[in-house]
Every structure is written in C-alpha cells, then in structure tokens.
Image (cartoon, helix red, strand yellow):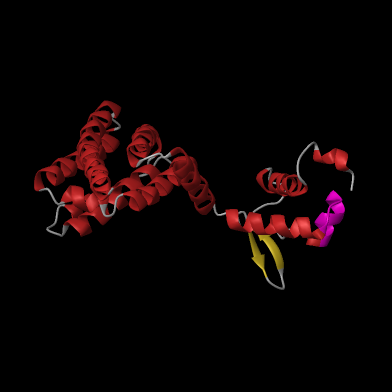
Amino acid sequence: MDHSRLDGKKTYEYVFDYCSEKILSGELRLNDKIPTERELAEEMGVSRNSVREVMHMLEITGLIECQQGSGNYVRCDPMEYMMKSVNMVMKLMQIDYVEIFHIRIGYEYAAIRLAIEVAEQEELEEMKEILLKMDQPMSSKESAKLDVEFHHKLVSASHNRMLILYNSMLDNLMDQFIENFRTKILMNKMRAEMLRRSHWAIYHALINKDLEMAIRAFDKHFRVVGDQLDKLMKNRKEQSENED
C-alpha cells in the first residue's frame, strides 16, 4: 500500500472517506451496486478486512445496505441518516426540545413564505379537508394526528425537499422527547380553540396569498405551543430533580 495517500489518516478513515465521497458526490447513486470488497481493496491498495470494516460502518449510518449473497447497495435513507446524526449531536451537546422548537419555528415560517407562492390548488383543498375534520367532535389524540397531518401538508406545499425532510425529522425528535406532546396541548379546550383558529387563519392566508396574515397566524400558533412546551420542560426538570 502507498501510505502517502493516507495523509496522516488511519486506514479505516481513509477507506471510509473514499467510499463516502463516492456516494455523496453522486458517483454512486441510490440503488447502485457498490464494487466488491476485493475490487475496492485493489483500487485503494488496502486490505479486504479494512474495506469490510468500513462497509459495516456505512451500513450502520444508513448509507448502504448489505445483502448477503448479492453485494452492497447504496440505500441512503435521508431520514434515517439524518436522525442518527442529529440524535448523536443532541446527546453530545445536551440539546433539549426547546432549541429544536426554535428551529421548527424558523423552517415553518420559511415554508409558509414559499407555499404562498407555489402551493397547488389540490394541496390547499387537502389542507381544508383536514381542518374541516378537525372541526368535528373527536378526542384530543385524534385531533393531534390531524394537527400533524396539517403541518406536514403545509410544509409539503412549499415544494422544498430540505424543509420537508427537516419537518419529518424534527417531528420524530419531538416524539422522542415529549410523549404525546400535541395531545397534551389539545386536551385544554381554550388552547385547542386558539390553535384551531390559527390553523384556519393560516389556510386563508394561503388562499389569499397574504403573507402578513400568515405571519400573524403563525405567531399566535407558536406562542400557544411554546408556552405549553415551557411548562412541560419545567415539569420534566422538576421530576428529574426530585428523582435525584
């Protein structure tokens, strides 16, 4: 092996960077079959064991799928890959949901700005149908599911793939930190009514392409959610201190 190519890296780091770059650069695309361990080992001038170790690491990150008897394939599941990465960062930096909530505020404001310009009539009709369902008598749990669906439709209407990806990812993170978060918010009739009105205001803002109306509606919506989040996080902290 020509050790000058390692540039101070350990062998497995060199192999990992080499293989990752092929995937992330687009040289290897989704569902492409990856060269065999022997071929990669010869190409890089490393041992097959080093390649095998890195294939296992890439499988764990979600970048590839190893099919026994068939080979390795690029399967980069963006959600799984980002969830694992963000989860690790959150644990290392001790980031709580309040900080994630602030990110959510930012990307939903960005989503509504785009949706006002590009949302299609069919998407608007789907949002209206969700809101009409939410107006019917139902449990807070059922209403919470529709709330999630409405916000997903809203972000999807931005037609921005990164916003859509972050929306799904942060919703999953929220569920990990606060069980049944939306359900708890909607159990209070006054909060539920405020959110119901803000949802309709957001919808009408989209219909009328009125950005100012949309911003005002979002301000009210996030104020209700933020206040409840603060209470939940405070309760979690007190419970943790009592357990200690």
Q: Is residue 129 visible?
A: no
Task: Determine whether, in the image, residue 110 is placed left or right of residue 232.
Answer: right
Does residue 29 appear in this view? yes
Q: Is residue 167 magenta?
A: no
Coordinates of residue 152 in the picture (x, y in percent): 35, 48
Task: Name the foreground residue: 184 vs 6.
Answer: 6
Q: Residue furthest top?
A: 212
Residue 241 x, y percent position in the rendering: 26, 44
Closer-to-camera residue (119/188)? 188
How would you classify the magenta stretch by its main secondary structure?
Answer: helix
Residue at the far right in the pictured view: 2
- The count of marks equals 0
Looking at the picture, tell me which residue is in the foreground, 204 or 83. 83
Q: In this rendering, would 231 be left or right of 122?
A: left
* Residue furthest bottom in the image: 69
**Residue nearest the observer in this picture, 70 or 100:** 100
In the image, 137: left or right of 242?
left
**Which residue is outermost to the left?**
190
Residue at horizontal 21%, vertical 53%?
A: 183
Residue pictured at 19% horizontal, 38% vertical: 224
> Relative to 225, does residue 70 appear above or below in the rendering?
below
Where residue 1 appears, as percent x and y from the top left, is: 89, 48
Q: Quadrant of residue 53?
A: bottom right
- Name which residue lies at 27% across and 32% down: 214
Residue range in magenta is: 38-47
Quick check: 223 left or right of 85? left
